[in-house]
Image (spheres, coloured by chain):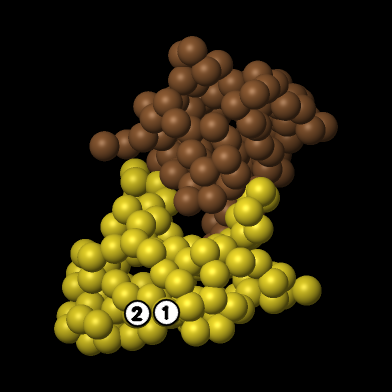
Amino acid sequence: DQQVKQNSPSLSVQEGRISILNCDYTNSMFDYFLWYKKYPAEGPTFLISISSIKDKNEDGRFTVFLNKSAKHLSLHIVPSQPGDSAVYFCAASAAQGAQKLVFGQGTRLTINP
Amino acid sequence: NAGVTQTPKFRVLKTGQSMTLLCAQDMNHEYMYWYRQDPGMGLRLIHYSVGEGTTAKGEVPDGYNVSRLKKQNFLLGLESAAPSQTSVYFCASSLFSEGYTFGSGTRLTVV
């Protein structure tokens, strides 16, 4: 019973273009959402988050959008750079904070020169 | 500034053997977690702790035990390793309102 789903195992994008990573969730109690980035042989690192009281949060090239009615969030990276090539995990929490995170399966993003 | 340190980084166990994975954090975080990462499954929570002396079960706790005797350390034990426990294990710590800081992982193979 996967409460957080990333249905695209992989995504390939041209350098300079927009990368859009998607995430769906089923638990309506989730109120805090995060994206993590993971390079090989390293632990995941926090990228950006959004609270359920917002529908958009922006940090430089990264923007996360939340559609609560559709139980869907997405991460936009503009413009995409080769260093963005990594596995991206979506995560959610029902604890009014970043506690007991439930992670999606991950999406491997490859940025082509 | 070490952050979260996991030891060992790699280990091969025979079925039935036991071992302990150590996680240490130097950020004075209250919360600590153990996750396992498997292909196609993402990161799944094994056990977690909300403070020194406390532990709780996560999504996949069977076959594992944990202890948090000191605030900075969170130990994950496998009493009798099974091939199904072959995985990459990540420890993380956090404050209540912030994202996790992860360690670099322990790759465990059980043969």
Residue found 69% across the figure and 76% down from its top: B26
Q: Residues within 10 Å of mark 2 (few under 14, many from 20)?
A: some
Q: Position of residue B56 (x, y in %)?
A: 38, 64
Q: Secondary structure at mark 2?
A: strand
Q: Which of the marked residues, 2 or 1, is nearer the chain's N terminus?
A: 1
**Viewport quadrant of the N terminus of chain B:** bottom right
Q: How many numbered circles does the render carry? A: 2
The chain ID associated with circle 2 is B
In the picture of the structure, the residue carrying the numbered disc 2 is: B77
Q: Position of residue B76 (x, y in %)?
A: 40, 76
**Lateral position of residue A53 relative to residue A109, left or right:** right
| Real-space CA distance between mark 2 and mark 1, rounded to the nearest whole angstrom | 8 Å
Asked whether A94 or B108 is in front, the reply is A94
Q: Secondary structure at mark 1?
A: strand
Q: Residues within 10 Å of mark 1 (few under 14, many from 20)?
A: some
Residue A39 visible, this angle:
no
